[in-house]
Image: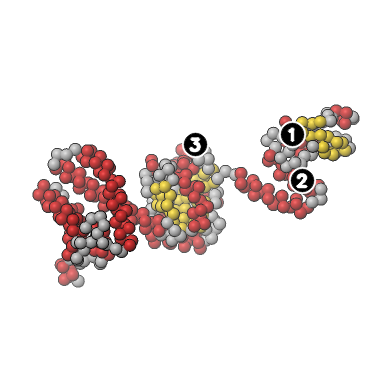
Amino acid sequence: MKRSTRSPATGGVGAVEITGGCACMEFSWKCMRRLSGFRWPESADTASHRPDVLDARPFLRDARSGCAQHRIRSAATRGDAVQARRDAAAAPQRRRHVMKNEATVIGLGQMGATLARLLLEAGWRVTVWNRTAARADALVALGAVRAPDVLAAVRASDVVVVCVDDHAATRAILGDDAIAAAFRGRTLIELSTGGVQDAREADAWARARGADYLDGAIQAAPSQMGRPDTPILLSGAQAAWSRHEPLLRVFGGGLTWLGEDPGAAAAMDMATLSYIYGAMIGFLHGARIAEAEGIAVDRYGQLVSEIGPTFADFLRHEGGVIASGDFTVGESPLKISVEATARIARAAHDSGINDEFPVFVADLFRRAADAGYGNEEAAALVKVLRAPRPVPQGQAAAA
């Protein structure tokens, strides 16, 4: 393109053809000199040294960052003050877009350290803090920034991930007035262990201080984090969930957002853990049956893993039955389970192994049958669990 440009050496005006172009389609000798270090030869006849055609491409390498500043200066030179002000206001925002993602992680136990490491590996700028500072050493070696105190850690990032023992520990760490005030405009993601009320109180605390809040329940071990199917339950403000989903997907791909009630993730965590622990106790009782009968327990474990998907489908069906309220038999009548659980309890007693678990389960199903649910779907057992817990006769008499 042809451009009339004032010579930096002589102050004269000369027509110079610049090839290669500029990203902002504006170019000046001053801009070129700043970007490339280019200097005309010191001579009284500077014009005689200038070529008629100048290839600007060598000078424009890595020049994209300079274009915005040049555009601002050029607009001001032309007297376009309004455009100059607009570009000046937009420049910080453009710089912000190219900055690395940033997050703070508070709590560097096994899980917290894993979360920080995953963020570092994903290219995030990570600030860390732990009560025992030495726990941050390995992460600092990987590129993390060690905050000198909690206040500095909170101020370092727009999003603060806390992963400590429980919500009580979080309250102790963030309780200082200055730290609490620093959360204004930030998001607190709580991944510590807690109950439904803990989560709702934490959400209220954050909102009172002008912060967003997300409550999370990680349903995996540290070694299982960062996988496409790593399950993490989340609840809280939808805007915060949408904004920070990319960060959370670094921790695991199996994310489930359960709605804006901050206590929903903790509630679902307890519900799924109830299933896990109940199944675990049943599995361990089965291991005792295998041992008592001389069956290899590892073979038993393999068989359970193989039949697991079939029983998962059955449980999904039973969940739908409960949700619908229609307990018409569709898969398995409850009376079958009454007999089966009573048989397991008798076998445990006869073989001399611990019978606490099968006796407990058999009693629940017996009570369901006594209530008239025997010819309904097995999920009708939930009706027994909905009723108040019966008080033993001895305790009732004492009361």
Near-viewer residue (93 or 398): 93
Location of residue 118 in the rendering, given as x and y in whole percent from the top left corner: 46, 41
Task: Identify the mark nearer the N-term, 3 or 1.
Answer: 1
Location of residue 398 in the rendering, given as x and y in whole percent from the top left corner: 17, 70
Near-viewer residue (22 or 44): 22
Task: Identify the mark nearer the N-term, 3 or 2.
Answer: 2
Whether residue 8 is visible here, answered yes or no, is: no
Write down the residue under mark 1.
Answer: 20
| Quarter of the figure that contains the C terminus | bottom left
In front: mark 3 or mark 1? Answer: 1
In front: mark 2 or mark 1? Answer: 1
The answer to whether the residues at label 3 and label 1 have Cβ atoms under 8 Å apart is no
Write down the residue under mark 3.
Answer: 141
Write down the residue under mark 2.
Answer: 73
Location of residue 211 in the rendering, given as x and y in whole percent from the top left corner: 52, 58
Q: Crowding at label 1, few (<14), some or many (≥20) Cα neighbours within 10 Å?
A: few
Disc 1 marks which amino acid?
A: Gly
Mark 3–mark 2 Cα distance, whole angstroms, equals: 42 Å
The answer to whether the residues at label 3 and label 2 have Cβ atoms under 8 Å apart is no
Q: Secondary structure at mark 1?
A: loop
Task: Identify the mark nearer the N-term, 2 or 1.
Answer: 1
Mark 3–mark 1 Cα distance, whole angstroms, equals: 43 Å
Taking the image as shown, residue 226 lies to the left or right of residue 283, namely: right
Whether residue 92 is visible here, answered yes or no, is: yes
Query: Residue at image x 38%, y 42%?
Result: 224
**Is residue 254 placed above or below 199 in the rendered structure?**
above
